[in-house]
């Protein structure tokens, strides 16, 4: 008798824990997704995932932008950490966030840069409660496909931010710390604590047994042991190996969070201590959050994510890089070579963490490819040169192959003043999401495929 297929929505459950599963052969043929993201028969693959990684304060553009169009060969110094995965990356130049410009509102380019980046809408200048921007592209995707997964979307951040007050020339702090907007008046706060993100993905926080698990310092895997043993016994050899890799990854992340929580802070400011669950090392903090994205995508807990490395106007210092000045302060370099060198070091550090995520996604086999093959990961900023506060020729990278709909490993230069929202429209099409426009979009981008 033929063995019944395992449901794609199968969950492993225990007291205080719920763990979703990665794609398994026991779940049957996976739908292939074409250029539009619509299912089509013929080959085994998986649905597209979409993530937006935001980094603040602009870039040292001469050392960011590839010299020649076409095949990515010699990478500029800031992009050098991407060398092992350069064939998975598109460098896109010429894109503009027009609605981040002043339009008579004066200062506030940092706040506008983040608020307009994914919305394509000029934010209302206010430091009160009457905030207004637009629905961001991630939430347009979540509204359409969010019902297919346990979480419609996931909002992460490497730095806390206020949801009120004046943070940039009369603009509310919410604009410079939030990139995801569920509606024009509803910003979505980001979670910065990897432990809480992990609980959201795999646990049932707040319950008595969840609290007991924390007190006992047990792994989430301990609480689903019976369910997992039954499952492993019922699947084939390939699925057994895949489950072993998946469970090992979960446990390794738990152990890293435990180790990170016990480490002393690196040159903390006087009187300041790190919240419980957040690593003292900023690099480890970002990498743990990258691991959360990989796990969430692998287990199909969500297909949409935003990740803000640091807020706009972030004045975070990077002593591990020998940079003790604040990032925002340095970004106003006034052509000082030493300040530019330090900005470049920060830019390179951020790209290194991005490369870590791409390598992580590429290491996870799925269907006829890898998790990165079935993802579209945007990395960029709503400011270009931090000293000039310009919003044209933005620093934008797009990684992943979008289920075979993107030809990566290239540098594409678009016509000046091309709306960055045209890129967002192109990505939504590959998620099978059709909208008349996104903010100031005028169509989709040619040449991605």
Image: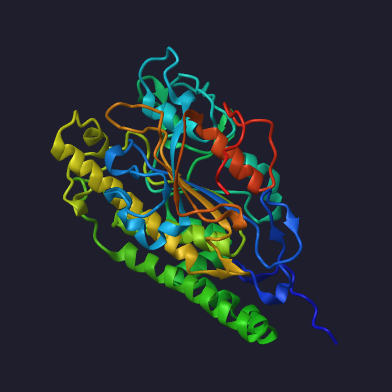
Name the spot of residue 431 as percent of width and height, x first: 65, 48
Query: Quadrant of the rendered structure where residue 23 is?
Result: bottom right
Q: Residue at x 29, y 57 (%)?
A: 281
Question: Nearest the camera: 387 or 269?
Answer: 387
Question: Nearest the camera: 200 or 69?
Answer: 69
Question: Nearest the camera: 232 or 263?
Answer: 232
Name the spot of residue 221 as percent of width and height, x first: 54, 75
Query: Quadrant of the rendered structure where residue 16 is?
Result: bottom right
Q: Give left or right: position of 414 versus 83.
A: right
Q: Is residue 322 above or below residue 329?
A: below
Number of marks present in the image shown: 0
Name the spot of residue 331 as percent of width and height, x first: 25, 34
Q: Residue at x 28, y 39 (%)?
A: 62
Q: Residue at x 48, y 69 (%)?
A: 363
Q: Residue furthest right?
A: 1
Q: Residue at x 27, y 43 (%)?
A: 63
Q: Residue furthest top?
A: 104
Name the spot of residue 106 as percent of width and height, x first: 37, 15
Q: Give left or right: position of 6 versus 298.
A: right
Question: Nearest the camera: 234 or 402?
Answer: 402
Would residue 211 be seen by someone viewing this image from the given angle? yes
Report the quarter where the N terminus lies: bottom right
């Amino acid at each position: 008798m033929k063995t019944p297929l395992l449901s794609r929505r199968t969950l492993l459950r225990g007291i205080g824990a719920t763990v979703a599963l990665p794609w398994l052969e026991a779940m049957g043929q996976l739908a292939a997704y074409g250029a539009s993201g619509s299912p089509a028969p013929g080959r085994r693959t998986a649905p597209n995932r979409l993530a937006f990684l935001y980094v603040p304060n602009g870039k040292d553009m001469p050392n960011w932008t590839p010299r020649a169009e076409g095949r990515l060969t010699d990478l500029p110094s800031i992009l050098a950490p991407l060398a092992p995965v350069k064939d998975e990356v598109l460098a896109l130049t010429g894109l503009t966030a027009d609605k981040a410009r002043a339009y008579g509102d004066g200062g506030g380019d940092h706040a506008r840069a983040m608020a307009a980046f994914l919305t394509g809408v000029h934010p209302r200048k206010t430091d009160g409660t009457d905030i207004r921007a637009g629905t961001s592209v991630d939430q347009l995707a979540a509204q359409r496909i969010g019902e297919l997964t346990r979480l419609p979307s996931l909002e992460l951040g490497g730095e806390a931010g206020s949801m009120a007050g004046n943070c940039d020339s009369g603009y509310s702090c919410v604009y410079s710390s939030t990139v995801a907007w569920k509606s024009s008046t509803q910003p979505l706060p980001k979670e910065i604590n990897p432990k809480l993100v992990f609980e959201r993905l795999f646990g049932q926080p707040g319950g008595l047994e969840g609290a007991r698990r924390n007190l006992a310092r047990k792994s989430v895997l301990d609480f689903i042991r019976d369910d997992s043993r039954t499952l492993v016994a019922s699947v084939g050899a390939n699925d057994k190996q895949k489950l072993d890799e998946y469970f090992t990854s979960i446990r390794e992340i738990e152990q890293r969070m435990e180790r990170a929580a016990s480490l002393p802070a690196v040159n903390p400011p006087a009187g300041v201590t790190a919240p419980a669950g957040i690593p003292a090392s900023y690099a480890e903090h970002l990498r743990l959050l990258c691991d959360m994205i990989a796990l969430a995508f692998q287990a199909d807990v969500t297909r949409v994510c935003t990740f803000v490395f640091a807020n706009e106007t972030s004045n975070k210092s990077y002593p591990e890089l020998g940079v003790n000045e604040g990032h925002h302060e340095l970004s106003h370099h006034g052509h000082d070579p030493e300040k530019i060198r330090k900005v470049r070091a920060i830019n390179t550090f951020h790209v290194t963490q991005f490369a870590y995520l791409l390598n992580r996604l590429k290491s996870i086999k799925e269907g006829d490819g890898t998790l990165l093959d079935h993802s579209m990961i945007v990395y960029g900023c709503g400011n270009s040169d931090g000293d000039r506060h310009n919003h044209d020729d933005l620093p934008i990278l797009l990684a992943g192959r979008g289920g075979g709909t993107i030809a990566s490993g290239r540098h594409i230069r678009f016509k000046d003043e091309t709306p960055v929202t045209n890129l967002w429209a192109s990505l939504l099409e590959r998620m099978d999401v059709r909208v008349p426009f996104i903010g100031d979009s005028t169509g989709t981008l040619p040449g991605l495929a």
